[in-house]
Image (cartoon, rainbow, N blue to C red):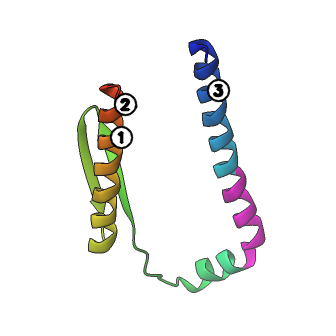
Amino acid sequence: MDRLLLIHLGIFLIFIGFFLVSFGVITYGIQNKDKIDDRIDKKEESEVSFSGIIMIGPIPIVVGNSPTLVILSVLILILMMLWVYLFYMRVF
């Protein structure tokens, strides 16, 4: 494939991803507007678990409040780094 075509395809996929995430958040907010308003009025607290990966160059930072999700994030991070390494060394 032409290198320029792959660059354009990657940029297009990034825009499609942003669009789908934005569309999903907006439709969720519209569908659950009454539930969201009720939570705000009642000041309900909900237990939410989260985990995330921040890559600053080659340095990974893993954040989260759930040990199981942090372990899952570390495993995903290891797979991502292995994938990048294999493509960098042109194994595939």
Residue 88 shown in magenta: no
Q: What residue type is labelled 2?
A: Phe
Q: Measuring 29% from the left and 65% from the top, which residue is drawn there?
A: 70
Badge 2 local density, few (<14 within 10 Å), some, or many (20+)? Answer: few
Q: Determine which residue is flagged by label 2.
A: 87
Q: Determine which residue is flagged by label 1.
A: 83
C-alpha span from label 1 to label 2: 6 Å
Choose the circle earlier in sequence order: 1 or 3.
3
Choose the circle earlier in sequence order: 2 or 3.
3
Cβ–Cβ below 8 Å for labels 1 and 2? yes
Callout 3: SS: helix
Q: Determine which residue is flagged by label 3.
A: 9
Q: Measuring 26% from the left and 72% from the top, which residue is drawn there?
A: 67
In the displayed structure, 65 sits above or below 90; it is below
The secondary structure that dominates the magenta segment is: helix
Q: In which quarter of the image is the N terminus?
A: top right
Q: Where is residue 9 in the image (x, y as percent from the top left)?
A: 64, 26
Q: Measuring 39% from the left and 67% from the top, which residue is drawn there?
A: 50
Q: Where is residue 3 in the image (x, y as percent from the top left)?
A: 56, 14
Residue 66 appearing in the image? no
Callout 1: SS: helix
Residue 27 shown in magenta: yes
Locate residue 62: give its quadrant. bottom left
